[in-house]
Amino acid sequence: MTLAPARAARFADAVIFFVNGLGLGLWAGHVPVLQTLHGLDEAALGLALLGMALGAIAAMPLTGPAAASHGSRRCTVAAGVVYGLALGLPFLATGPVALAAAVLLLGAANGAMDVSMNTQASAIERQYGRAIMSSFHAFFSLGGVAGALLAGGLVASERSGAWGMVPCGMAVAATVLVAGRWLVADHGGGHGFSLPGKAALGVGVLALLAMMAEGAVLDWSAVFIASGTGADASTAALGYAAFSVAMTAGRLTGDGVVRRLGRGRTLGLSAALAASALMLALSGGTAVAILGFGLAGLGLANAVPVLFSAGARLPGLAPGVGVAMVATMGYAGFLLGPPLIGVTAEAAGLRWALLLVVPGLLVVALAGSRLAGAPEPSAAAVPRS
């Protein structure tokens, strides 16, 4: 691949990562609107959100073989268009069955888009011949922030619900359709559904442990700061804000770190930082907790990019299949972590429950260099852009 097409593909996939994050930020900001619109109590809302997660988990293992057979460019565009068009469907649903179907479709489209755009990113990374995966995930994080801000503006202007989500979703779909023209025209390299082997299980377990910690901070950091340090709700929210800002900064600079240290060493040191930071967050008052969660975001910033990149290089597997395996196990950890912490908190207290994720991060720190230290791409490097 020559310089101009490689740069164009990188920019195009970064835009797709951005609009994926934008859509999730919009969705998160509209969850209260969805609850009011359909008259859902907390239990019913929880089931709706679980349905989105189940849709994603069901679609991820199927997307890898599809990307292997038909190419990640086609899968990225198809999944991205469906994802954009599905963003507004839950707000147009007229009953519980229609709502469940809409949420499942949105989750499945998001899961398929996640796997295919990461598979495409790994193809572009191989063309570049150096680590660039973290930059794609930085654009996802930036998109999430932009989507949350846009959701706040729509809600404040009373243009929320279907009035806001449908046109925003159509814009997401159109953006993916246009950007898809410049993606790498990969032609797969594998076929069929595969069960994870030893190497895939190893990388997948590391992804599960890392994303379990990420999910724990997402759902429990504010609760811990409020209950454990006595902070008010607005101050407690700063814990996850610090985590998000630090994670975005870490991803923006992560490619340089990976090039200097290598994937395995970066993963090991990052996980060690995240484990230390979480212990710091749980050891002091409000300011210490906010600082600790922020440092945890910096530590976890590049874990998922490194592990997805390693998944795309698993021996004997097409890149899409490897990414799908790692993504599915990682997402399972993201979902299982918060409920596990909640159950443990009932018996032992939230501080001890949150400490559950620390041993897992230490496992990632110790095993990362061996399991994720895949060889660097051997393709001729594209000049820096």
Image (spheres, rainbow, N blue to C red):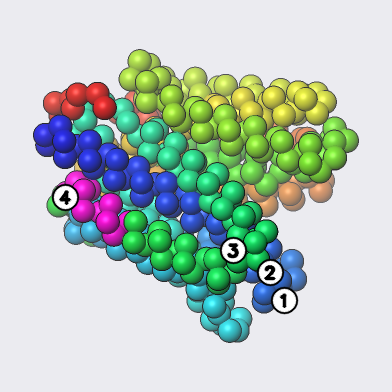
Query: Image quadrant for the C terminus?
Result: top left
Residue drawn where x is 59% and y is 49% of the image? 149
Q: Nearer the viewer, mark 4 or mark 3?
A: 4
Label number found at residue 185: 4
Q: Residue at x 68, y 69 (%)?
A: 35
Q: Is residue 323 above or below residue 298?
A: below
> Which region of the structure is painted magenta?
176-186
- Which label sits on residue 50? 3
C-alpha gap between disc 1 and disc 2: 6 Å
- What amino acid type should be assigned to the residue bearing mark 2? Gln
Element on which disc 3 rests:
helix
- Looking at this view, is 382 or 71 the one in front? 382
Q: Secondary structure at mark 1?
A: loop
Residue 200, given in percent of the width and then of the height, sits at 35, 42
Q: Is residue 180 magenta?
A: yes
Answer whether residue 74 is magenta in the image.
Answer: no
Counting residues from the N terminus, which is met first, the one under dot 2 or under dot 3?
2
Q: Give the numbered dot on residue 331.
A: none
Residue 296 drawn at (x, y percent): 61, 28
The residue lying furthest to the top in this view is 260
Where on the picture, by quarter, is residue 290?
top right
> Which disc is residue 35 wearing?
2
Marks 3 and 1, Cα distance to the nearest angstrom? Answer: 17 Å
